[in-house]
Image (cartoon, rainbow, N blue to C red):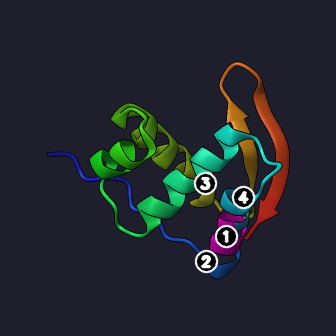
Amino acid sequence: MNEATLIRLGSEQRNELERRVRSQTIDVRIARRARIVLLAANGVSNHEIARRLKISRGQVISWRKRFHKVVSRPLIVICRAVDVSRRLIEPRLFD
């Protein structure tokens, strides 16, 4: 069985993701991605995240890996929305 990509969040990152989840004006896809990362950081399995959010397990794995890949680099820019067909949108600097 494959190990899920480990997600660790700093307090600033966690606060920003929680803000996105609570937002009434943010795009639904962005809020869903924030929920995926928050649940992953809380140790919830990919299968359970997929069940709770009613999405495929593949989507969970993909976003978990994307987030980990971006935040594992020093001085990185995390995108609020990453759409494979549209490139990177709304950059936001995290430490």
Tell me: 75 left or right of 8. right
Q: Which mark is residue 13?
A: 1
Mark 1 neighbour class, 10 Å CA radius: few under 14, some 14 to 19, many 20 or more: some
Residue 28 is a magenta residue: no
Question: Label 4 near label 3: C-beta < 8 Å?
Answer: yes
Residues drawn in magenta = 14-18
Up/down of 1 relative to 10, above or below: above
Q: Position of residue 6 (x, y in %)?
A: 39, 61
Q: CA distance from mark 4 to mark 2?
A: 16 Å
Q: Residue at x 55, y 55 (%)?
A: 35
Quadrant of the drawing holding the C terminus: bottom right
**Within-10-Å neighbours for mark 4: few <14, some 14–19, many 20+:** many
Q: Position of residue 3 (x, y in %)?
A: 25, 53
Magenta residues: mostly which secondary structure?
helix
Give me the residue at 54% from left, 44% from top.
Answer: 66
Asked whether 63 or 2 is in front, the reply is 63
Pointer 4 residue:
20
Q: Looking at the picture, which amino acid does disc 1 mark?
A: Gln
